[in-house]
Image (tube, helix red, strand yellow):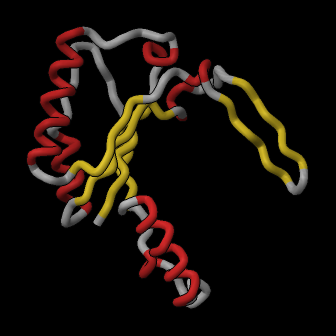
Amino acid sequence: MRFMVIIKSDENIEGGAQPTEEQFAAMGKFNEDLVKAGVMLAGEGLLPSSKGARVHLKGNDKTVIDGPFAESKELIAGFWLLDVKSRDEAIEWVKRMPVFEGEDSVVEIRQVAEASDFGDEFTPELRAAEDALREQLGQ
């Protein structure tokens, strides 16, 4: 089972604050633990929303909105993609994540959809095409 672990942003991150050397080291150790356990498929931090854009798609209308965006609690600061046996195992890993003095983090855990989660509309032909794309990506 694959789970995306989503780290929510906050005012410090949106303000451009950089992690300290201690924070980088602690997060690096946590990432190393995930890799050694064989559960980390990917993980990245994201720059503040001031460096991003949103694209609103409505019919044929496409509107680009440059960051920064309000409501930092709704924004994403980073993510991990974990391959674990269960939702409970994903939760246990997140509980081991470093938390620093004065930090109040929100982490969301969402299961990645698999082919078996979709109905008959995801036909064998569409599944084969999806599998071919994943093979090209090396997944």
54 left or right, relative to 136: right
Q: Residue at x 59, y 26 (%)?
A: 71
91 left or right, relative to 73: left
Toward the viewer: 109 or 128? 128
| Rendered position, 16 above or below 131 | above
Q: Quadrant of residue 42?
A: top left
| Rendered position, 51 above or below 44 | above
Toward the viewer: 43 or 92? 43
| Rendered position, 85 above or below 110 | below
Q: Residue at x 37, y 60 (%)?
A: 138
Q: Position of residue 101 (x, y in %)?
A: 22, 14
The quarter of the image holding the C terminus is bottom left
Q: Position of residue 52 (x, y in %)?
A: 62, 27
54 left or right, relative to 82: right
| Rendered position, 121 above or below 40 | below
Q: Position of residue 85 (x, y in %)?
A: 19, 66
Q: Residue at x 69, y 35 (%)?
A: 54
Toward the viewer: 92 or 58? 58
Q: Residue at x 21, y 10 (%)?
A: 21
